[in-house]
Amino acid sequence: MPDQSLPETRTPEAPEAASTAGAAPDGFSRRRLLGTAGAAGIVFGAAGGAVGYATAPAGASTPLASVGERRLMFHGKHQPGITEGLRARGHLVAFDLMPGAGRKEAAALLRRWSETARRLMAGEPAGRDDTDVARDAGPSSLTVTFGFGHGFFARTGLEKQRPVALDPLPDFSSDRLDKKRSDGDLWVQIAADDALVAFHALRAVQKDAGSAARVRWQMNGFNRTPGATARPMTARNLMGQIDGTRNPKPSDADFDQRIFVPEGGEPAWMANGSYVVVRRIRMLLDDWEKLPVTEQEAVIGRRKSDGAPLSGGTETSDMDLEKTDSRGNLVVPFNAHARITRPDQNGGAAMLRRPFSYHDGIDADGVPDAGLLFICWQADPLRGFVPVQRKLDRGDALTPFVRHEASGLYAVPGGAAEGEYVGQRLLEG
């Protein structure tokens, strides 16, 4: 779990009076409440987030709470769900194309999925046969993101368009991969700040697949709910560690170069897209929680209380890798996770991480099946994820406490312009 993750993005809390908001008044549909056109509609800022409230009909006095009202845009240079802050709820799902389904069926599917994603992210019903699961909620920062796996290109006759960067990941010694929960022709990431909104999108995507594709695997994740802390803070993982202090930021001068495929790159249809590595990493929590806090901190290289490096300072202080204690020992151990994953210890390799925690119940022997749905974005996984994971494989102090159980690599094309669907340049090029 490299020490790079996007700090949480917070939406200001709504006034207490608005805490019970969400349901449309009797006689008014969710579409009418959220989608009314004109000056009375939702007001959007430059970043695409809602900065006002959807205006209810005359007589209604309670607006949607701030968490529910925030809307992110589907159309754009990049797909949504990459650079935004962590969402409270997520679903990851991979599909395989059905036998006999090819390029034509895949194009029709991506067209359906793109339209459904656009509607749901705007707070509208999915379309025909909407389940009404999210009828009373706002968009809740919903994002839906689509990608292509290695096998997609052979099934659609587009092998010549398959990127070299999509070559299978190498084997790692810590892998204990379940092939049935790995890979897949198509990958979808759904994220929102409301669990019902996220599930609604998952169900709509699954129904849209129809006879073109079937689910290969599906995973559910969560993060801290917006407003759960007194101030915006970097998230903690299920080990109790602050996880994500050194994530690349969009304000970094080389951010786009590290995360997105440039215009004019190869293949052309991946311009402004990114490559995502997805790993289901089980945390051996019973073993981890037996360690004293000081030993946990030595494994990570940071204080558990506030995320500051063991060399001193605050969470965002630079880590002094040469600092020693009175006995001459390194303050940050040579195999500490935070030391090994630093970009300056890996030839500048960097990834944008947007993970989810997961908990899939308790085994028959009483052991929790819980951990991290590791999701990282980069312009080229051979220069991002692979060198860092190889180094972790050779001597990360965290390795005895985690197990990589599933893996996938997907090409995520750039965003769709108005009137286009995701992947159109590939499927109709």
Image (cartoon, grey):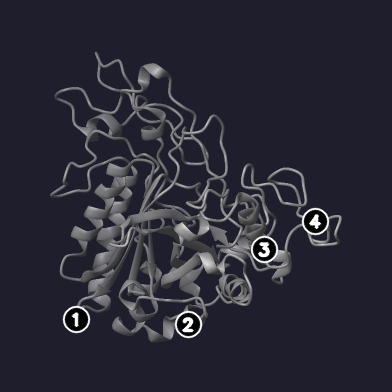
Q: Is residue 383 left or right of residue 226?
A: right
User: What distance separates the C-alpha of mark 3 from that of mark 1?
Assistant: 47 Å
Q: Nearer the viewer, mark 3 or mark 4?
A: 3
Disc 4 packing (10 Å; few <14; some 14–19; many ≥20): some
Tell me which label, 4 or 1, sits earlier in the chain. 1
For residue 320, the mark is 4
As helix, strand or loop, the secondary structure at mark 3 comes to loop
Residue occupying the point 16% across, 65% down:
210
Tell me which label, 3 or 4, sits earlier in the chain. 4
Q: Please, what is the three-letter code of the amino acid marked with disc 1?
A: Pro
User: What distance separates the C-alpha of mark 4 from that of mark 1?
Assistant: 56 Å
Q: Is residue 304 left or right of residue 369?
A: right
**What percent of the width, then of the height, locates residue 323?**
83, 57
Q: Please, what is the three-letter code of the amino acid marked with disc 2?
A: Asp
Residue occupying the point 57% across, 75% down:
386
- Circle 1 residue: 99
- Circle 3 residue: 336
User: What distance separates the C-alpha of mark 2 from that of mark 1?
Assistant: 23 Å
**Which corner quadrant holds the C terminus?**
bottom left
**What percent of the width, then of the height, locates residue 397?**
62, 66
Disc 3 packing (10 Å; few <14; some 14–19; many ≥20): many
As helix, strand or loop, the secondary structure at mark 4 comes to loop
Q: Is residue 160 left or right of residue 239?
A: left
